Image: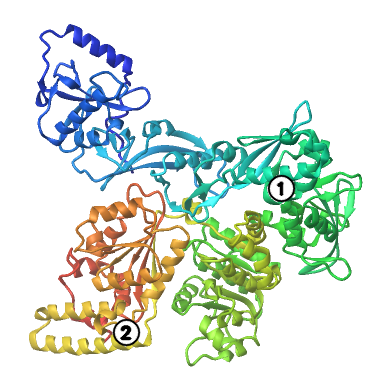
Amino acid sequence: MAKKNEGGRAPKKLSLGQISDIWQNASATTENFRANIPLEDTVFNLGIDESGRAYFFFSNDKGALIALEDVVCGGSPLDLAIDRVKQQRLNTVSWGDGPNGVVYLDQSAEFAYQLFKGERNFRFGKSIVTNAEKTERTAVLLRIDPSEELKEDFSGVDFKLSLVLNTETETLENPIPLCPTYALCGKKIYRTRDLGINYNKLSDIEGVLNGKEIEKFLSLFASIFPSIKIEMTQFSETPMPKTPAEPALHFAGLDESGNLSIRQMWCFDPFPVDFVSENKPSTLVRLHVSSRTISRIPVTYGGTESWKKMDSLLRGCISRHPECKEEGARAYDIEGDELYITSALALPFLSENLSDLAQNYRLFGTEALSKFRFKKVTPQTHLSVGNGIDYFDTKCTVEIDGEIMSPRKIVELYEENNFIPLSDGSRAIIDKSFFTRLKRLLGREQKDGTYKISFFDMPLVDSLINAKIENAKESELPWQKFYFGFDTIPERKTAKLPVVKKLRDYQKYGLQWLGYVTENNLGACLADDMGLGKTIQTISLLASAYAKKSKGSSLVVVPKSLIENWKNELSKFAPELSVYAYYGTERSIDKARRHSVILTTYAVVRIDIKILQGEEFEYVVLDEVQQIKNTASQASKAVMLLSARHRIALSGTPMENNLGELYSIFRFLNPPMFGTEGEFNCRYGNPIQKENDEEAARELSAKIRPFILRRLKQEVAKELPERTEQVMYVDMSPEQAALYEQQRIFYQKLIKGEIAKNGFEKSQFCILQALTELRQIATVPESKTESVVEGAKWERLVDAIAELVESGHRCLVFSNFLASIDAMAERLEKSEIAHLVMTGATTNRAELVKKFQQDGKYKVFLMTLKTGGVGLNLTGADYVFILDPWWNRSAEQQAIDRTHRIGQTRSVFCYRLISRGTIEEKIMELQQKKADLFSAIISSDGQQIKKLTEEDINYLLNV
């Protein structure tokens, strides 16, 4: 929470006229006023004029102004800076634009720097303000706070805009810029990063703005103040490469003489063309809700080249038309962004060049061309749909201004002319995007003249190509019932669930949604944020299905690290479901068939696909479906060979890097949706990723939307507790497990001998050493094997963090061991995840905390439990991982409280990583069975064993 400016806003702003009056009065009324006043006898004063510019002046202790020339200076840097100002006044007329005693701070950066350097007090109205102690540059930010949780359409949301100043340790509200490099906040003056020449206008931007205008406002702000970052909770600012604005022409109309006026404009979707053309902002700002990013896009605008090309076209047209030669150079005129063409030249020019203009410019105001037989037309597409399941044989015609043509004919005419010649001699101008959409939707014409339209494209035909279906009522259309049925999902009755856990409302909807899509024999992707319960929603669906006596087994395919988690969740929440882990050397398909749910891994599916492809499963569920993102991988090819009545995919990040990953998922869920990979890339992949085609992106989004359900944590925050704590179980590799077992046996014998020799009380150090080393092996065996044996937790943790970062979240990772911090940092670097590290050896802790809180590029903060456990405010994160949990829960709770504290507006999820078959799991069991033991076992620092019985040691060492 930013601290409010205790000093408030500036007192009433004084005008220069008022200062001049004060000066005149003071000069006239002050008796015995003396010149040559030593600097140390003066009072330093600050003020702000009506334009927001700050100024400095001297006075005596009674408030009488002292002229700058009357102050005697010595040899200090400030004295020298004052002397330079005096000299500039002598050499420059009206230097500083103010009375003799006033110095504007923005006139001399050196004077401002020396004035605010060191400890010094200033009068500011009725207040006394002083320099901040540190001279490091602070950052002034524009903070935007939405009035409610943002969705993709935020036009109805109000945004509060305010300036804040970030110091090393805190965020302060209401800074008052004094000059480009200094700001007053409260009663302190801070040095800032350069605010630019318009610094005095910054205070004017604070207030509330509607979401319809927010991106336009931020674009102008970023253009005026390029050095000031824009800050919004959970969003990170992302710089983008320079992008050229798209040139456009606006046919402004005809004057009384019939002369045509054309104005050059600029487009940059989705901003209005008038906004871009009139302002030509150097930076455009977009808010991307799905990725939680704020994009700053530097924009370039073409110079005079386009008009030079236009000039060449006009000259060529004049040379070819004798009726225009008489007018010569008078036939057209270019003034700035305006082009004027006489009526005699306009018709031949448009006839010859409109196709080229439409190719190189976006055209507006084409209704002004009606005199020249050009008209803007919206085509009407007519469809006659035949029978089908995945595809429908469809007859198609296109009507343009009453004339009927085939799609093939209209495309040919457009590609030849860039307009459609009509039978009455007029020329129809049609948006280029219509032809792009038409070709995308219809594909190739069949031999019988029909087109095959996918079931998944039918809902799009009306909105994309203005289609009218001629041969069926809406109620008879086979796809309408399915797509309209989504509106009724909340009304669907669900039987009493045979699961132990009570579902939250959003989870109930997820269950209903999964049921609705799969009952219609279509695949569904549940893509909720991590921690929202994708697993429990899927288990609820399976439990409901098998409660109805569904036939056949269901196959759940997961990464190896999740096998045990799924077994635990199924056992906990749906104990009536029989489960078989089809995994390991003893796996048997015959045994698997006797169970409702078969758990396996992607590697086993790849190896045993010849066995598994012969099975007919009720459901095939792919957890962490991004495992098949590469369509060329053997795992991806293998899952495509599995047979199932219903297919479900689970992922917190269904697309990580490119659209090919999305294609791979839907190739598994609904194979006919996109056709071949080549067809998908031609229709969507290349236009979106290589050509930045936003229309193709919107079409793709609309197409997959019914089949992918994604809820972000903040969208369901009202249903979540403030803090959720869960356990992540991890299976060690055979090498790690063997090392652990070897050392466990060694310490078991060692401790037994120590106790026999010295007694239990005198063996405490040996016991603590044993427990500590076994804990290290359970998490970071690299520290004991010179990195020969690798810990199993890394892969699980990095995958989880990568998923969260992709969804716009930020994480804290705590460990008790420096070796764990180093190992994790190395893996985050390899994964190119920006992170910070803080240990006991870190000296600049405040600086690191400030970086994490203010700079959205840092996604992960690694720290030791002791270092991060006390006194830090890290509310920038909303996920916490305890890498090596131990029995001192109070220390862990303190660490979690770094993010779950005042100022945290989101629910916090905490995960403890536990290696199976180790002392960590034993401690978890003891915590559940002997809750009262733990206040006695460990002292407050978590190290010194106080009361631990021999029986407890035997239990922990698995004797």
Is 367 drawn above or below residue 789 in the view shown?
A: above
- Let me know if residue 548 appears in the view: no
Q: Could you tell which of marks 2 and 1 lies nearer the N-terminus?
A: 1
Where's residue 548, x and y in %? 65, 72
Where's residue 280, x and y in %? 54, 40
Is 48 drawn above or below residue 720 in the view shown?
A: above
Is 759 drawn above or below residue 106 in the view shown?
A: below
Left or right side of 545 for 772? left
Give the distance between the C-alpha atoms of the residues marked 2 and 1, in whole angstroms. Answer: 66 Å
Q: Nearer the viewer, residue 729 or 29?
A: 29
Q: What secondary structure is found at the residue carrying circle 1?
A: helix
Task: Give the image quarter of residue 397.
Answer: bottom right
At 80% from the left and 35% from the top, the residue drawn is: 344
Left or right side of 359 for 27? left
Residue 18 is tagged as none
Assess disc 1: are there few (<14), some (14-19) or many (≥20) residues with their C-alpha within 10 Å of its C-alpha: some
Type of amino acid at the residue the image marks with label 1: Leu
Q: Which residue is mark 2?
A: 789
Q: Nearer the viewer, residue 17 or 586?
A: 17
Q: Nearer the viewer, residue 233 or 14?
A: 14
Q: Quadrant of the C terminus?
A: bottom left
Pointers 2 and 1 in contact (C-beta within 8 Å): no
Camera-side mark, 2 or 1: 1
Task: Give the image quarter of residue 278.
Answer: top right
Type of amino acid at the residue the image marks with label 2: Val
Q: Which residue is mark 1?
A: 357
Left or right side of 588 for 794? left
Q: Quadrant of the N terminus?
A: top left
- Let me know if residue 325 appears in the view: yes
Where's residue 502, x and y in %? 50, 62
Is 152 drawn above or below residue 926 in the view shown?
A: above
At 79% from the left and 30% from the top, the residue drawn is: 258
